[in-house]
Amino acid sequence: MDAGKLTQQANETQTAIDQGKQNISDTQQSLSQTTTNKANVDKDVANKTTNATTANNAVSQAQNNVNSATTVQSNAQTTLNQRQQAVADLQSQLAAMPTLKVDKAAWEKAVNGLVPADQIAAMTDAEYAAYKQKWYAYCQQFAEQSYSDNQYHASAKDQSTKVSSLSDLTSAQYQELTNFALNLINQARNMWRNDTLNTKSQIVDLAIAKDVAQAYSDANRDIATSGEHLGDALDDTAAKYHVGSQDVGNWISEDWGQTFLSNTQKINGYVTMADLKSSVMDDIVLMLFGDGGQNSWGHFYDLIGGRSDSSDYNNQSYLGLAFDKFGALHITQRESANIGGSTPDTTPIATAVSVSELKQQLNKAQTAQTTAQTNLNNAKASLTAANDTLATARQDATNAQSELNAAKTKQTQLANQITALNNKLASLKTKLANDTTSLAKIKSELANLADAQAAQQKVLDNAKARVQATSATLATATANANAKTAALKSASQTLSAAKQVQAIAEGNAQSAANTAKEAVGKAQHAVEALTNANQHVVTAKAQLTAITDKLNNFASLKQHSLNELTSAQELLSTAKTQLKQANDVLNTQQQKLDVANHSLDAAKLALDKATQFVNQCQAEYDAAKAHLSKLDHADETLAAAKAALEAAKVQLATSQTNYQTAKENAADAQQELTDAQTAAADADQAYTHAQKVLRTLELQASLEVPTVTEKPQQSVDAVTEVVVDEAQADSVSDTPSAIDQTEVTTATANVAATGHNTANTENVAPSLKRLTPHTPAHSTTAGTLPQTGEASENHLAVLGLTLLSLLLSGLTLGRVTSKRRIH
């Protein structure tokens, strides 16, 4: 190889070496920067790993909080359900327990009188008689209103609890009935007395009442036929159990009330607890609010504890009750025990919760329900917040994981770059070393070539002389050149091998890049899986929101149902009022029809009599005219007969006019009655309870033997027909109609009387619930009622009170002579 080529080759190799050095420097700088970047990325990966761990821990904690909040909400919902059930149970108990409804001011007026006592004392006898009649009428009106306002409403349990016979009542059932009575009586005591001194009951009181009722059964003493108390039996029972008081002695009081339980048992073959409680409530309501007039509020004072100024007003009283074989109710009371001996078993009966206690429990339950609702609302809010926090934590965890994955990807990329740069740097260094070696060799060859050229020049100078030496030298130079050529070829082969090593390194780098790409794909799949999981969380949250909405809708539906129930109850109350109004109209129109029918019959009878009298006068006139020639005073006789005939004709015309008027009035009354009956039928459809009363009356009227206790079971039409027939019979006499003359005392409205064991008893007014068999026939003069001696009013009043008694189903009660009123 000549020097020019070697020089050119040396220059090229030097340029390659310089470029290689520059490349090495650049690669080292890139490697240093990449290493720094990787160190920063390593720190970032470490931080993001910590962040991802923290975010995942937050997700776990948030999930735990959601689970806890869900449990709290579930518990709160369960508690609310329990509180709501407790409120519903108490409301049901309170609804089944009767609550007395009474206008206290009207009650005080009925008991204490319409005017103060000093005004009554200043009245004349006539003024007092008029005042008493007005007062009795007020008491009657108050009794009717109070009875109407305090009707018993049976529970399903009481309706389904059957007793085959009154004698089969258990001690537990008597205790239940006693608690029922105590609830009513103590409500009245609290309202009237304005204190909390309640009547109580002990086991001995049930035994006392049972013995008293048995004494009446043994003596066949039926309230329906005799209202006289068995004073000796009361004394004996008080002495037997060593109880009493009223100035300390063996003593018990008794309130005696009639019921229809025996008839109910005959018809149905059994009585229910609803029948028993209804009878007890009817008796007590009538004793408390319908005991005015002739009874002077005796039962009322006995149950209420006497007058406020009496010595025993603040004494504790104990009550028992029992039924005799006739179905009559006996209520006994006493104040003390251990009189003249030891009273057995003064253990209190199993007491039932009172209305006031139920109301207190209901208030507490409603407060607890409100608290439970608040807790549930708070739990729902906490659950919503926890779910929001969980969603946020999951999103934060997703973001942290995404950032970590990105950082790891960048970390991997930088690591790959560092590896590639290291490989490149090693390759560049190898190439530089090879180029440097080649340059050294070339320089050596150039040096050798210069030496050879110098030697050659020296040989050329001596060419001629030393050709052989020069040829040998040339051969040596040629051999050296060949050796150098071989060395150059070896360098070329070394360079090719280095390039193959570089290609292999680049292949390994591509494989690492593919592996990294697969890792990135796997990471993307993981991200997609996490995204799907988040979507499931969102779906579950939506489902939870839907369930919460359903719970809220359930509360709304429940409130709507309660509103509908309240509306239905208001409609029922309105229907009841309309029924009562329709029945009042029906009664009024029936009375008008009775009066019109009576007047029509009387007018028809008068017309018949007038016609008969005219015919008689006409016959006398014809006879007088035939014998005119035979009579000494024919003209005077004829004139008198003629005048009598004319008078009879005038009377006939008047009677015909009256008959026609009465007939028209009867037709009008009949039409009014028909209209009233139509209105009553319409009202009856709105209030089914009235149908039950009428069916019961009609069924009882079907009994074959109409005893005194069965008379109240006659239908309203049958009683009306009897009274109308009597009114028509009265009109036959020549005196004015008894309808205009007779009076009936308001004592017929006295539905109860009290009694105790004293021998001094008074007569009892007829009951609203039984038709006394001793009522005298209507006469042409003002009549009096049996036992009371009060003047009776007209038949219309009798009919009205009879119908009213059947409607109210009141009870005849016993009497007591103690604690008399000032009137």
Image: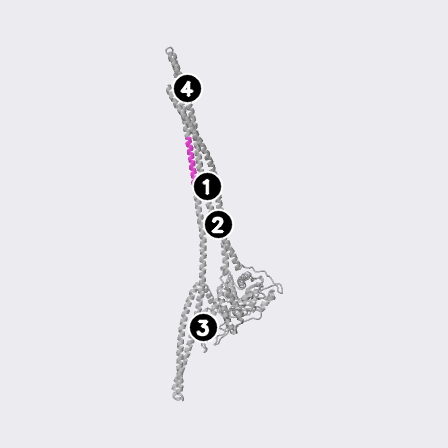
Q: Residues within 10 Å of mark 4 (few under 14, many from 20)?
A: few
Q: Nearer the viewer, mark 3 or mark 1?
A: 1
Query: How many labels sit on residues?
Result: 4
Residue type, label 4: Ser
Q: In the orientation shown, which residue stands out farthest toward the top?
A: 465
Q: Taking 216 as reference, is 618 left or right?
A: left
* Residue identified by numbered label 3: 724
Numbered badge on residue 444: 4
Residues shaded magenta: 507-528
Q: In the rendered structure, which disc, 4 or 3, sits on the residue that comes first in sequence?
A: 4
Give the x, y percent position of residue 797.
Answer: 47, 71
SS under mark 1 = helix
Q: Which residue is mark 2?
A: 378
Question: Tag 1: Cα neighbours inside 10 Å, few (<14), some, or many (≥20)?
Answer: many
**Closer to the observer: label 2 or label 3?**
2
Q: Please give left or right for residue 264 compared with residue 6 in the image.
A: right
Give the foreground label among 1 and 4: 4
On the question of residue 169 being in view, the answer is no
Quarter of the image containing the C terminus?
A: bottom right
The quarter of the rendered structure image containing the N terminus is top left
